[in-house]
Amino acid sequence: MAIYAADKLIAQARALAAEYRRAMGKPLPGVSKEVAEYDAMQLLELEVPPEGEHGYDAIDPARGGKRIQIKSRMLPDDARTSPRIGQIRMDHDWDSVVLVLMNEDYEPIEILEVDRDELLEYRDKSSSSRAKRGALSVARFRIIGRLLWTAENGRDADGWSNQ
């Protein structure tokens, strides 16, 4: 039996990460990914993939077992540049990428999704070497993706597309 409940540990990780960033001026490594994965699993009702599966972080049972790679980005209020997300590994087997955007307290504010085919189409059309490597800005992800969840409205069953 676990000593701590996962939701309590995540709440503590959020508080620690936010305080660390305020005190040190930089993010606490690895925390945003763990928090974002937890949030995506809970808010989108995703499941953990089978043991030994690599290249994706979750499965969506409501959409036929869709394999989902989860990315995260904390958006500070004082950001002066267009924030980027971590590189998307195109050589792995997955069906879509979910991006969890968080505020300075590491609370989710938006969750967006891009299907693999849409991402490949963007990469193939783009002249950007960053796009060819699977690196995107948050702004580009918003353009090619669709909104799945917001802090204000919760989950949008149809998804909102910016295309």
Image: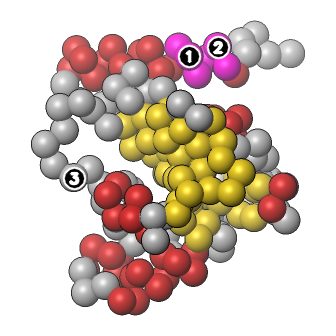
Mark-to-mark CA distance, 1 and 3: 27 Å
Amino acid carrying mark 2 in the image: Lys
Label 2 Cα neighbours within 10 Å, binned few <14 / some 14-19 / many ≥20: few
Do the residues bearing badges 1 and 2 touch, measured as CB atoms within 8 Å? yes
Magenta stretch prevailing secondary structure: helix
Q: 2 or 114, which lies in front?
A: 114
Amino acid carrying mark 3 in the image: Ser
* Residue 69 is one of the magenta-drawn residues: no
Which residue does the image show at 56% across and 57% down from the upper left?
A: 160
The residue at which mark 1 appears reads as: 11
In the displayed structure image, the side of residue 113 where residue 94 appears, left or right: right
Mark-to-mark CA distance, 1 and 2: 5 Å
Q: Give the image location of residue 24, x and y in percent.
A: 21, 20
The residue at which mark 2 appears reads as: 8
Using the rendered view, name the quadrant where residue 154 is placed.
Answer: top right
Q: Give the image location of residue 152, x and y in percent.
A: 53, 31
Which residue does the image show at 61% across and 66% down from the upper left?
A: 96
Amino acid carrying mark 1 in the image: Ala
Which residue does the image show at 86% across and 15% down from the upper left?
A: 1
Label 3 Cα neighbours within 10 Å, binned few <14 / some 14-19 / many ≥20: few
Mark-to-mark CA distance, 3 and 2: 32 Å
The magenta stretch is 7-12
The mark that comes first in sequence, 3 or 2, is 2
Which type of secondary structure does the marked residue at label 2 adopt?
A: helix
